[in-house]
Image: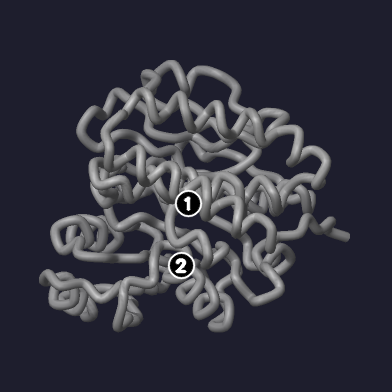
Amino acid sequence: MLGIVIANWNGEKLIDKCLLSLKNQSFKDFKVYIIDNDSKDNSINVIKGYKEKLNIELIEMDHNSGFAPANNIGIKKAINEGCNYVLTLNNDVEVPNDSLEKAMNFIENNKEYDVLQLFMINYFERNKCDAAGLVFNEKLIPSQVGYREEVSEVLSKEISIEGACAGAAIYSAKALEKVKLDNGDYFDSKFFAYYEDVDLSLRLKRAGFKTTVLKESIVYHMHSATGNKTSGFKEYYLARNLFMYTKRNQSLEKYKKAKKTYYIILIINLLKNFNMEVLKSVFKGIKDGNKEAKKIEYKEFN
């Protein structure tokens, strides 16, 4: 069985479209685990309205735990209930009727892959790719393959990826169990939001698990629909978590050499989106990121 894990926070309109698309899937052997992060809108009633139409378990949090912790709760439940594969899905994603069937058919015939990226297309500009996976440079800086490129161009070329964007990614339970942290986390709960899928991707890569993109299993993603682009929230976590995931996934020597590059990247991004709120958020993120990184150790996988 496939476990589908969705974290939700104040996404009543988004989650409705997402669940309706899951209800209409040709593939039916799945259970949906929704972790609601203390939504204040009508999300809970919308979700409960699908309980007669879908196999859903709703976990209601009494606070906003964040994307990573919420997903961990759902993943753990799915694996404990016997799901061999887990699909993490953003609540702002719409899944065409045959996408899950195509994905599961591929998995059945290609067991060498443990991480599978569904092909993410921009919901509003359906000729534009949103994400076809992740690749990394020598300093572990990630790039989203295909981002903002023409869908036809991305589909026409050979794609080799090293990681998956958790907005629509399938992971084998075997792989997740192998690389989970000592505290039982799959996604590092300290990340709260952003880069948690990058960190997981690097752990999976270092452990020898193969990743591929499923070009025929598409989803439509309302990119940034659930993020806050102006308050500094995103900029803070992108700055902070950069130091945390890079420290975990490379030797201390390499990390120290690469830190200058990380500062340059953050400064360039700051200049592109400059305002005082973002400035304060980035500098606080750098400070907190360096502090948290000191607690993280690089560990080889056997």
Q: Position of residue 187 (x, y in %)?
A: 56, 62
Q: Residue at x 58, y 58 (%)?
A: 171
Question: Counting other residues with Cα less than 10 Å from the Cα at mark 2, is it few (<14), some (14-19), or many (20 or more)?
Answer: many
> Which residue is more in the foreground, 255 or 215?
255
Q: Is residue 89 above or below residue 286?
A: below
Question: The disc labelled 1 sits on which kind of residue?
Answer: Ala
Helix or strand or loop: what does disc 2 sit on? helix
> Which residue is more in the foreground, 217 or 294?
294
Q: Is residue 202 above or below residue 58?
A: above
Question: Mark 1 = which residue?
Answer: 166
Q: Position of residue 168 (x, y in %)?
A: 43, 50
Question: Mark 2 = which residue?
Answer: 71
Task: Report whether 173 appears left or right of 302.
Answer: left
Precedes in sequence: disc 1 or disc 2: 2
Q: Residue at x 53, y 37 (%)?
A: 133
Count of numbered badges drawn on the protein:
2
Colour convention: one colour
User: Which quadrant would the C terminus be assigned to in this image?
Assistant: bottom right
The quadrant where residue 5 appears: bottom left
Q: Is residue 113 above or below residue 60?
A: above
Q: Is residue 149 above or below residue 252?
A: above
Q: Position of residue 196 (x, y in %)?
A: 53, 54
Q: Residue at x 63, y 67 (%)?
A: 173
Please report contact status of discs 1 and 2: CB closer than 8 Å, yes or no: yes
Distance, label 1 to label 2, CA atoms, is 10 Å
The quadrant where residue 82 appears: bottom right
Task: Report whether 142 appears left or right of 165.
Answer: right
Task: Report whether 176 appears left or right of 45.
Answer: right
Question: Counting other residues with Cα less than 10 Å from the Cα at mark 1, is it few (<14), some (14-19), or many (20 or more)?
Answer: many
Question: The disc labelled 2 sits on which kind of residue?
Answer: Asn
Q: Position of residue 122 (x, y in %)?
A: 30, 34
